[in-house]
Amino acid sequence: MGFKKIAIINNKGGVGKSTTSVQLAHGLAKLNFKVLLIDLDGQNDSSLFLGFTEKDYDDTFFDLMDSRYPAKLEDCIINARENLDLLPNDNIEQINAELHRSSRIDIIMGEILSDLENMDYDFVMFDCGPQRTKVNDAVLCYIDHIIMPVQVESASVRAVGNIYDYLDQLRLSSELITLIIPNMYDARTNESKKNLNILKNVFSDNPGILTEPINRRVKITEAGRAGKTVFEYDEEAADQFFKVLKRVVDKIV
Amino acid sequence: MSKNNPEEANDKKFETYLEKELKEKVEKKGNNNSENNGNGDGNINGNGDSTYISNGSVNSNINNKSSKKPTTFKLSKEKKEPKKIKRTYYIYEEDDEKLNELARHSGKDKSELVRIAIGFLYDNAEVE
């Protein structure tokens, strides 16, 4: 069975990429899809938000890249929840260094993850780091869809165009951008409202790309800190992501 | 936590969504796929990135553009050769899809299938 490949990416840091990755991955898993979340952010936040630390895993993404004795993909994957597996990383700098040596960044991720073809995942999701790196180049050349969380504040909104430049640089289509999620929205502030309106104006020709905003909630942060997803932690916080999850299903499933 | 059992409450929402909206949606998409062009590619949305068609043998799918019936052979589950070396060669997208499809059907990895293909070609091709 084929699987959908999704990158959660934004070239700006702190916009909620890992939070979004974890919540959507677990949400899809709860909808009975089999999901693999690949943590390729140097901070390992996806793994942490799912309750895993470095002590919990030995083999990681980097071990798949060993040219002499590559690890088996199945040995690097850990089961995080029902229907949800996690492929952690612990050495993003070295992964980048290895990828710098690759002459074909456009196919390298497919080669590293070739065993996925024989697994039964419905979704493979990448939690990407913020910078333009070789890892992100390789991910973007591999995936079918981009979901981009954007913090609803002026610097993040101004930076939305960066991903389009990035894709252009890689000679990839901007149509990969499937959903943009206004994140950490605070309806009480004029600043937030103003920035949300800017986003709506920017995408007025393609309103379907923009989801409803995810409101800033302390419970979302608390859940991550507790190693739980919002669906395990709080009903109202879960509702924030449930509405976005439905959009993911509508657009991608 | 804000409520007594938020996980249970959230699970009920998932169940409701699964039972009503998602089931209906997937069924609808499934019907559309079979009505449109029979391109049941095994992907959830039916318009994914492979050309897998779940209607029989591997060869009938791969060679459906050709009227001439190709030589067929069975893929056994024999053990892989232990010694391997890594090489990078170029391959057309269409052939890559065929390889993916063969891998799915046979349960063999793609390197193994390439090995079989090369062996077959080596044994059967006449080089001028």
Image: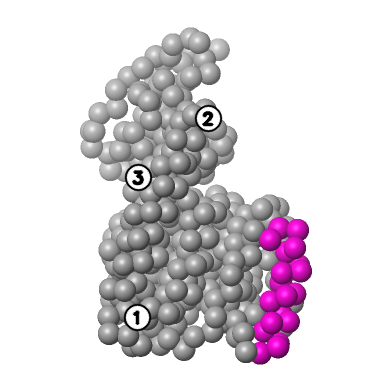
For residue A220, which quarter of the picture?
bottom left
Q: Position of residue A120 (x, y in %)?
A: 34, 48
Left or right of A3, for residue B91: right
Magenta-colored stretch includes residue A191: yes
Which of labels 3 and 2 is toward the front? 2
Which residues make up the magenta segment? A189-207
For marks 1 and 3 on the same chain, the one whose residue lies earlier in the sequence: 3
Indicate the secondary structure of the residue bearing disc 3: helix
Amino acid type, label 3: Asn
Q: In this figure, what is the number of numbered marks?
A: 3
**Residue denoted by label 2:** B36
Same chain assignment for discs 3 and 2? no
Residue sitting at x 71%, y 87%:
A191
Q: How is the image coloured?
A: one colour
Q: Nearer the viewer, residue A240 or B86?
A: A240
Indicate the secondary structure of the residue bearing disc 1: helix
Look at the image and tell me whether residue A29 can be seen: no
Q: Which mark is residue A118?
A: 3
Residue B58 to residue A175: above or below: above
Indicate the secondary structure of the residue bearing disc 2: helix
Mark 2 neighbour class, 10 Å CA radius: few under 14, some 14 to 19, many 20 or more: few
Residue sitting at x 55%, y 12%:
B128
The residues bearing labels 1 and 3 have C-alpha atoms spaced at a distance of 34 Å
Could you tell me which chain the residue with mark 3 belongs to? A
Mark 3 neighbour class, 10 Å CA radius: few under 14, some 14 to 19, many 20 or more: some
The residues bearing labels 3 and 2 have C-alpha atoms spaced at a distance of 27 Å
Look at the image and tell me whether residue A240 can be seen: yes
